[in-house]
Image: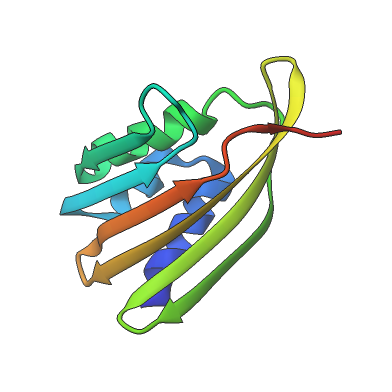
Amino acid sequence: MTEAGQAFIDAIATRDWTALERCFAKSSRFTAAVPNEANPFRDRAGGEQIAAQFRAWFGDADPYEVVDSSVDGIADRTHVTYRIRCFEDGEWQVVEQQAYLTASDGGIERMNLTCSGFLPTD
């Protein structure tokens, strides 16, 4: 079960959007809560839309690195967490995301994610 979570982390770390898309099952669902007052929720379906959401969040950051991550099983789900340090919008930022996912042989079926937002850092 944690293999799907590790494949997801690996794709995030390398910003390999094609590999990220392949992590998800065809009928996958993704729900995220992000710190945005106007629209704090993201709801996407299918690997293509889900990968596009992560690309929108992280695609322009340069440099970009995953500085910490973990993958653990919890009952019938997998918990993944990662912290990214990146340079975007003219400043260094850090962002942390945590997700709980349900996977099958076809890939990640369901992912629920929460995000810290992009926070300025030294």
Which residue, as the protein is rendered here, is positioned at the far front? Answer: 37
Q: Nearer the viewer, residue 21 or 119?
A: 119
At 31% from the left and 36% from the top, the residue drawn is: 42
Q: Position of residue 96 (x, y in %)?
A: 60, 48
Q: How many marks?
A: 0
Q: Is residue 105 left or right of residue 98?
A: left
Q: Position of residue 29 (x, y in %)?
A: 21, 50
Q: Is residue 69 left or right of residue 76?
A: right
Q: Nearer the viewer, residue 18 or 122?
A: 122
Q: Quadrant of residue 111?
A: bottom left
Which residue, as the protein is rendered here, is positioned at the far top? Answer: 90
Identify the image quadrant of the C terminus: top right
Q: Is residue 78 left or right of residue 98?
A: left
At 47% from the left and 42% from the top, the residue drawn is: 16
In the figure, 6 relative to 94: above or below? below
Q: Position of residue 4 (x, y in %)?
A: 38, 67
Identify the image quadrant of the N terminus: bottom left
In the figure, 8 relative to 53: above or below? below
Which residue, as the protein is rendered here, is positioned at the far bottom? Answer: 75
At 44% from the left and 57% from the top, the residue drawn is: 8
Q: Position of residue 121 (x, y in %)?
A: 80, 34
Q: Is residue 41 left or right of residue 84?
A: left
Applied colour scheme? rainbow
Which residue, as the protein is rendered here, is positioned at the far left? Answer: 27
Q: Nearer the viewer, residue 83 or 37?
A: 37
